[in-house]
Image (cartoon, coloured by chain):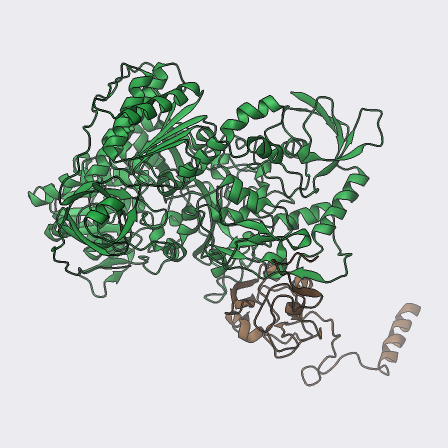
């Protein structure tokens, strides 16, 4: 700790930081542009100048860029010094010389860092009277809009895009005052994290194109804290609504999970909520017209329930509350997980490993701090994108820790640090089926089939800790690689092992567990991370339930005849024939969902469920962190949360437990009572009767406009604002104006800080945790008492089969996930279906790139164009999962190749 | 007594004064041009809608009686998809006019807006938009803004240089 004097007031501050972040942490307002807490300082914009005095007798002082100056004990500085203030006003005057007169038509206006800083420095009138520089814009794809005239040359975009996120196709061109930030030519930005440019850019050069389709200023949005539903990581988001439609997603800082950034799937996938295939009214198929009101639909569902023996199928994309409600309604014995059986086993295994392993599962921030990473079988960029970004940081940071501390340079001195480190990266080993975007950073990449990956993993564990079983018949070079990985992991202080369910191999998970346990046995603080298929896979596994297959059997054997399907398209979980048979043999099918799909077509009663922005609930992410998402806006009466539908259904059929539950908190209490290990979920957020100074927390900013005109076209008399019985948030702008508890911050705003950069006022320390702790409660911690056992299930070597290919699942960030596939901007980025075949195999089969290859998996016929791959192992092939036009198959699986296979064009429904 | 007589005298004198009362509605009041009355949306000198749907009027409105939705034409010109003022709430404070960066929204000297049915006081864009420039002549926002719209490409606005040639090294 050091003492510094800011304008003669002493402050106790930690050392090692720069002056700018220290001032911001202390709540002082210092304007800045080029500095970003996640990217460090380069001192390019000169905006953060402050006066620094030599000692207490020095009255003159010198101007210093606060972002480039390290905190020293006894330092005396002044922010309000007239000379410093004038300097800053001049700087922004110069930065603004070419800035266009655009605020009125600029999407950034109202949440613009440049506006905030201009007001903060008091630069009111332009003294520059000459002509302004202009630029042509570029087309950058469906996510971002480009308006280069507005650029102030702070370099944040390229520093983020290239250095932080590893993008290749955004750069700075030209020289002197002609600098151009863009691509070499028009085209789609390739990075999966490009959307963050909209928030990284301090002004409106890069703006959210999806927001532009239905533009709303930040002050007009009704916002609520939410959690991303598009993968298992559970990044925190803030969703904004106006006039009944969802308008945009912005980052909601969580120091432990997503930090300052989001991936493009998470940021732009929200449009599925506004999609034309939304279910906006409940349907009863026997009625005419089918679309009906809530009460008729409930009565029809209740009647079906009374007359039949009911089973329930849950969902990994539905909230914990909805799944629990269904489980209670149909009874524990009749509750089935709506995930494919292979996936079910993998998730159960992951949960078991995380519970029993002696290694802890780290949060994403902890992954960023890892000094050695070993990835087994996961294409992180496509299955858990933000984790890939975290791994990238870990690999970038590792050399810093060592070299930079030796060279006596502070870590935040970005330019100097980059110069010193050059392209040096930390140890990252990857054993994966085929090329991924992280390969470029890897120390060693090992492309192989899942069995070989698992065998390598087992070998590494065996080398680290000989009690872990060894692998017989491993090739010399593989043994050498295993030795290299083991050495790197043993050398590291915080090694992290990353694996997951996407490869579809239990052996890989077990191998990863063995490595982590072996490292812990050697007294290392190793971490183990598993990525899971869906947003609430972990929650569903913790809740417990039967397999999907047993649901099919229950109907087939006549044990039951009616099924309730909760937010689940079964055609994505099991083969088409099986599901159609199953749905046809049910007497009544009750479906709750928010998007039309193949399953909802078979529903006898279809209840209109709320999408993530129209529901409250809890998700448990891959780390075991329970996080709450809040309803963003009131919905029309016909749409409500699945758990509320099921609750009302339970009340109508007089269910002896459900009838007694009133509201959200009762459900949470019931879950905790039945599952004591989930006790934490009650502490995730304050209860619904929580108030600050007797007030609720407003979802809308205090400058929310148009309240007396928004609905005036329908009726000039304004209705009473809808009340939210489930949370301490109100749907209006009325309520407590201060900072809410960290788990329920609807948006970041502070006086003078309208942009998302206001987050520094909410943090304990800039770039650190939120005040009051980061949101979410971890439910899984390793048990030090538990006796670790090493898995001995070492798989045999993979043997290719003649006339067959072993099909491995490949994932795509855009296309493999069900919900985001319904979002128009994401749809533009979904690749065409293909089958990735090893070049040698293709040569042998006389197949060329782009030629159609017919094959069959478990009776399901496919005919897809071949994509040659030099990396995928011979005898295997890669099939993209979940893409529109690629029917479900449980992967990995053997495919029968037969050039004579009759390809019958199959009926395909696209939504 | 004196004061009583004086008052009567003064009152009597008023009978010969010029009348302040006007015979409204037969005779209309002459209102100053800066009178804050009915709100209109004006057009720029080229006949295009001046409103660019920036939402500042709505934000400035103390009774929140303005609501609108921005949209764009195919050439990037922004305009309000709908623009609604609930005059049954409006207090004619004129803040919207002050906030407007394009002189689009203007308060004009007209107060005759009485309605028997309150619902009729909800004015949509078709009721608000006039065919002229209103009080402020000659201003065309898009001529000074940097965005390209149909008929005005980059570098063609007032006080703008032609677009930078990125490939040139000449200063």
Is residue A781 something that shows in the picture? no
Is A57 on the left or on the right of A388, as rendered?
right
Q: Residue at x 91, y 68 (%)?
A: B3
In the figure, the brown chain has which letter? B
Is residue A15 something that shows in the picture? yes
Count of numbered circles on the image? 0
Q: In the displayed structure, would residue A264 be above or below residue B84?
A: above
Give residue A722's position: percent from left, percent from top. Answer: 44, 51
Image quadrant where residue A49 sits = top right
Q: Residue at x 23, y 65 (%)?
A: A289
Give residue A550's position: percent from left, percent from top. Answer: 14, 39
Q: Colour of chain A?
A: green
Q: In the displayed structure, would residue A7 be above or below residue B151?
A: above
Image quadrant where residue A316 sits = top left
Q: Quadrant of the N terminus of chain A?
A: top right
Is A659 on the left or on the right of B107, as rendered?
left
Residue A469 or residue A900, whichever sits in front? A900
Give residue A687's position: percent from left, percent from top. Answer: 42, 35
């Amino acid at each position: 700790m050091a003492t510094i004097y800011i304008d003669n007031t002493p402050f106790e501050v930690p050392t090692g930081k720069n002056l700018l972040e220290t001032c911001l942490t202390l709540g002082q307002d210092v304007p800045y542009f080029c500095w970003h807490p996640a990217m460090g300082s380069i001192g390019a914009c000169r905006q953060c100048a402050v006066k620094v005095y030599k000692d207490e007798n020095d009255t003159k002082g010198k101007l210093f860029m606060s972002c480039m100056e390290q905190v020293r004990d006894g330092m005396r500085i002044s922010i309000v010094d007239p000379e410093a203030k004038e300097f800053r006003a001049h700087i922004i005057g110069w930065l603004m010389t070419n800035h266009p007169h655009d605020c009125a038509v600029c999407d950034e206006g109202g949440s613009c860092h440049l506006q905030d800083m201009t007001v903060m420095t008091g630069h009111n009138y332009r003294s520059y009277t000459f002509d302004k520089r202009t630029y042509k814009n570029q087309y950058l794809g469906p996510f971002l809009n480009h308006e280069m005239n507005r650029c102030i040359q702070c370099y944040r975009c390229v520093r983020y895009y290239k250095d932080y996120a590893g993008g290749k196709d955004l750069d700075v061109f030209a020289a002197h005052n002609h600098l151009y930030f863009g691509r070499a030519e028009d085209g789609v930005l390739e990075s999966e994290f490009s959307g963050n440019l909209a928030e990284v850019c301090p002004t409106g050069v890069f703006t959210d194109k999806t927001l532009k389709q239905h533009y709303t200023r930040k002050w007009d949005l009704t916002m609520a804290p939410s959690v991303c539903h598009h993968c298992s990581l559970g990044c925190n988001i803030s969703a904004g609504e106006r006039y009944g439609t969802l308008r945009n997603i912005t980052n909601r800082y969580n120091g432990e999970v997503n930090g300052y950034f989001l991936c493009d799937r998470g940021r732009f996938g929200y449009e599925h909520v506004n999609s034309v295939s939304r279910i906006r009214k409940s349907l009863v198929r026997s009625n005419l017209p089918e679309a009906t009101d809530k009460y008729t639909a409930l009565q029809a569902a209740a009647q079906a329930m009374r007359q039949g023996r009911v089973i329930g199928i849950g969902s990994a994309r539905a909230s914990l509350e909805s799944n629990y409600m269904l489980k209670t309604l149909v009874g524990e014995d009749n509750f089935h997980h709506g995930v494919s059986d292979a996936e079910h086993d993998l998730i159960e295994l992951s949960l078991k490993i995380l519970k029993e392993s002696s290694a802890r599962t780290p949060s994403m921030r902890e992954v960023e701090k890892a000094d050695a990473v070993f990835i087994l079988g996961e294409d992180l960029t496509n299955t858990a994108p933000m984790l890939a970004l975290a791994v990238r940081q870990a690999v970038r940071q590792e050399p810093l820790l060592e070299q930079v501390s030796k060279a006596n340079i502070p870590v935040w001195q970005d330019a100097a640090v980059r110069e010193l480190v050059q392209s040096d990266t930390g140890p990252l080993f990857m054993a994966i089926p085929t090329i991924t975007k992280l390969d470029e950073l890897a120390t060693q990449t090992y492309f192989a089939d899942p069995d070989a990956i698992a065998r390598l993993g087992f070998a590494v564990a065996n080398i680290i800790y000989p009690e872990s079983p060894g692998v017989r018949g491993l090739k010399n070079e593989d043994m050498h690689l295993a030795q290299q990985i083991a050495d790197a992991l043993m050398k590291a202080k915080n090694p992290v092992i990353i694996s997951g369910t996407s490869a579809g191999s239990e052996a890989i998970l077990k191998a990863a567990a063995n490595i982590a346990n072996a490292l812990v046995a050697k007294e290392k603080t190793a971490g183990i991370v598993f990525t899971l298929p869906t947003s609430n896979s972990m929650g569903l596994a913790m809740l417990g339930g039967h397999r999907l297959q047993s649901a099919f059997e229950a109907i087939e054997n006549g044990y039951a005849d009616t099924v309730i399907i909760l937010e689940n398209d079964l055609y994505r979980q099991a083969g088409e024939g099986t599901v159609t048979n199953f749905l046809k043999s049910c007497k009544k099918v009750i479906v709750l969902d928010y998007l039309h799909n193949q399953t909802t077509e078979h529903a006898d009663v279809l209840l209109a469920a709320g999408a993530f922005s129209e529901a409250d609930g809890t998700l448990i992410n891959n780390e075991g962190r329970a996080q709450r998402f809040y309803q963003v806006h009131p919905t029309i009466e016909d749409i409500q949360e699945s758990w509320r539908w099921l609750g009302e259904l339970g009340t109508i059929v007089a269910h002896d437990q459900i009838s007694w539950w009133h509201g959200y908190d009762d459900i949470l209490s019931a879950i905790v009572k039945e599952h004591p290990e989930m006790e934490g979920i009650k502490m995730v957020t304050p209860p619904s009767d929580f108030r600050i100074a007797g007030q609720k927390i407003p979802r809308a900013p205090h400058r929310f406009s148009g309240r007396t005109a928004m609905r005036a076209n329908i009726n000039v008399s304004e209705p009473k604002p809808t009340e939210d019985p489930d949370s301490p948030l109100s749907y209006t702008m009325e309520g407590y104006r201060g900072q809410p508890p960290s788990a329920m911050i609807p948006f970041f705003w502070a006086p003078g800080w309208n942009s998302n950069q206001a987050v520094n006022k909410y943090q304990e320390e800039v770039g650190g945790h939120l005040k009051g702790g980061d949101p979410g409660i971890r439910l899984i911690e390793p048990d030090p008492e538990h006796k670790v056992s090493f898995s001995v299930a070492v798989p045999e070597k993979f043997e290719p089969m003649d006339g067959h290919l072993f099909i491995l699942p490949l994932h795509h960030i855009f296309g493999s996930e069900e919900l985001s596939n319904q979002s128009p901007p994401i749809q533009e980025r979904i690749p065409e279906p293909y089958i990735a075949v090893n070049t040698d195999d293709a040569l042998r089969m006389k197949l060329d790139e782009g030629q159609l290859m017919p094959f069959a998996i478990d009776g399901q016929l496919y005919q897809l164009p071949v994509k040659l791959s030099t990396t995928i192992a011979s005898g295997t092939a890669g099939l993209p999962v979940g893409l529109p036009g690629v029917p479900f198959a449980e992967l990995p699986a053997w495919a029968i190749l037969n050039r004579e296979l009759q390809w019958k064009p199959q009926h395909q429904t696209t939504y | 007594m004196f004061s009583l007589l004086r008052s009567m005298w003064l009152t009597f004198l008023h009978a010969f004064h010029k009348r302040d009362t006007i015979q409204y509605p037969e005779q209309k009041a002459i209102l100053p041009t800066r009178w804050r009355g009915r709100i209109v949306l004006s057009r720029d000198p080229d006949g295009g809608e001046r409103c660019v749907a920036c939402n500042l009027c709505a934000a400035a409105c103390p009774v929140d009686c303005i609501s609108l939705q921005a949209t764009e034409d195919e050439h990037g010109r922004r305009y309000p998809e709908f623009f609604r003022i609930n005059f049954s709430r409006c207090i004619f404070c004129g803040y919207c006019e002050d906030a407007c960066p394009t002189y689009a929204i203007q308060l004009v000297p007209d107060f005759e807006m009485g309605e028997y049915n309150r619902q009729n006081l909800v004015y949509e864009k078709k009721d608000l938009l006039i065919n002229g420039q209103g009080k402020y002549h000659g201003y065309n926002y898009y001529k000074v803004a940097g965005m390209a719209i149909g008929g005005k490409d980059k570098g063609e606005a007032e006080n703008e240089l032609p677009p930078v040639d990125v490939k040139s090294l000449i200063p």
